[in-house]
Amino acid sequence: MIQIFALVLLLQSVDLTPAQEMEAAHLMQEIRCVVCEGQSIADSDAALAQDMRLFVRTRIAAGATPDSVRIALAQRYGDEVLMRPRLTGRTLPLYAAPVILLLAGGLLIGVASRRR
């Protein structure tokens, strides 16, 4: 049991340069905890968030780019893991709806004001 605990501690101590540490910290703010509602993995205390933080730190230490880490996590957990989902056919309505609603509201206000 002690050996397992020591192994876990060893795995969690990933050495990063200050630049990599900043990159990992910024990336952890952009990844959503899949257990907690609306929290990033940087803010979450869930065990899964700890595992995800370790994954991010390990990949960054290995030289992976933030985009490749995001893609790996999205492939594993789905696009919902990203605080800002990628623009795809499935997420396009999320980005287009506010613009369409504003245009429709402006059009309705314009039509209503001309009738008076």
Image (cartoon, rainbow, N blue to C red):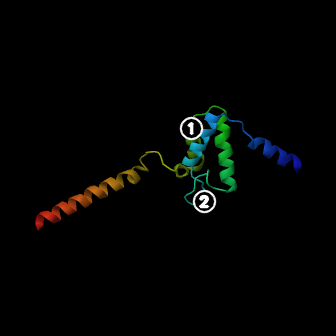
Residue at x 55% of width, y 49% of height: 78
The percent coordinates of residue 10 (x first, y second) are 79, 41
The percent coordinates of residue 84 (x first, y second) are 48, 48
User: In the image, is residue 86 above or below residue 105?
Assistant: above
Q: Farthest top residue?
A: 63
Q: Secondary structure at mark 2?
A: loop
Label total for image? 2
Residue at x 68% of width, y 35% of height: 16
Disc assigned to residue 10: none
Residue type of the residue flagged with mark 1: Pro
Q: Is residue 99 left or right of residue 78?
A: left
- Residue labelled with disc 2: 36
Compute the Cα span from label 2 to label 1. Answer: 22 Å
* Label 2–label 1 contact, CB within 8 A: no
The percent coordinates of residue 56 (x first, y second) are 64, 42
Residue at x 26% of width, y 55% of height: 103
Residue at x 26% of width, y 61% of height: 105
Q: Nearer the viewer, residue 20 or 89?
A: 20
- Residue labelled with disc 1: 66
Q: Quadrant of residue 37?
A: bottom right
Dividing the image into 4 quarters, which one contains the C terminus? bottom left
